[in-house]
Image (cartoon, rainbow, N blue to C red):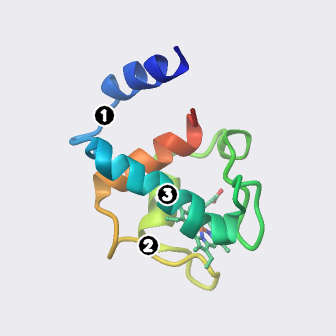
Amino acid sequence: MKKLLFLACLSSSAFAAEPSLERQTELRDLLKNDCGACHGLTLQGGLGLPLQPKNLEGKSDEFLIDAIKNGRKGTAMPPWKPFLNPDEIAWLVHLLKNPN
Ligand code: HEC
């Protein structure tokens, strides 16, 4: 049921192109392993800021997308644009705000 809701939510959102299901699995792995290395396995924070929904409340998608795309200069947050396309980054931000 939760999953259905998530899908319904996804299909009504503004992605130009949602990543394929296969790519979504890769992105979830990336989030856990690569992003999790700094942000914590459950994204509770570590070297990087916590990225759980309660931490992202009030932060716009654009703001978070920019952080992932371009990194944060002067911090350990690297730019991911060489590895992730804009749709994938938007999808990740959506996932962070609406984990299932
Ligand atoms: C090498 C460590 C490292 C890795 C790997 C990393 N981050 Fe970060 N990230 C950081 C740090 C440090 C910050 C805080 C930057 C600051 O102080 O503004 C940050 C900030 C962020 C922010 C902004 C949060 C906010 O509230 O402003 C987002 C979103 C984010 N990271 C997402 C990701 C995602 C998604 C990945 C994986 C694709 C990732 N990060 C991988 C270190 C990392």
Q: Of callouts 3 and 1, which one flags the residue occurring earlier in the amino acid sequence?
A: 1
- Residue 70: give its label: 2
Q: Cα distance, mark 2 to mark 1? A: 21 Å
The label nearer to you, 3 versus 2, is: 3
Picture coordinates of residue 70, whole percent (x, y): 44, 72
Q: Would residue 26 appear left or right of 53 to someone viewing this image? A: left
Picture layout, residue 10 above or below residue 31: above
For the point 56% across and 34% down, the residue is 98
Picture coordinates of residue 34, whole percent (x, y): 55, 69
| In the foreground, 75 or 47 | 47
Picture layout, residue 86 above or below residue 82: above
| In the foreground, 78 or 38 | 38
Q: Amino acid under label 1?
A: Ala
Q: Quadrant of the C terminus?
A: top right
Picture coordinates of residue 53, whole percent (x, y): 67, 40
Read off the residue under disc 1: 14
In the displayed orientation, state which residue is furthest to the left.
17
Read off the residue under disc 3: 29
Q: Of callouts 2 and 1, which one flags the residue occurring earlier in the amino acid sequence?
A: 1
For the point 42% across and 72% down, the residue is 80
**Image region (quadrant) for ligand 1:** bottom right
Q: Of callouts 3 and 2, which one flags the residue occurring earlier in the amino acid sequence?
A: 3
The label nearer to you, 3 versus 1, is: 3
For the point 48% across and 62% down, the residue is 30
Q: Mark 2, residues whose alpha carbon is within 10 Å: few (<14), some, or many (≥20)? A: some
Q: Amino acid under label 2?
A: Asn
Label 3: which secondary element:
helix
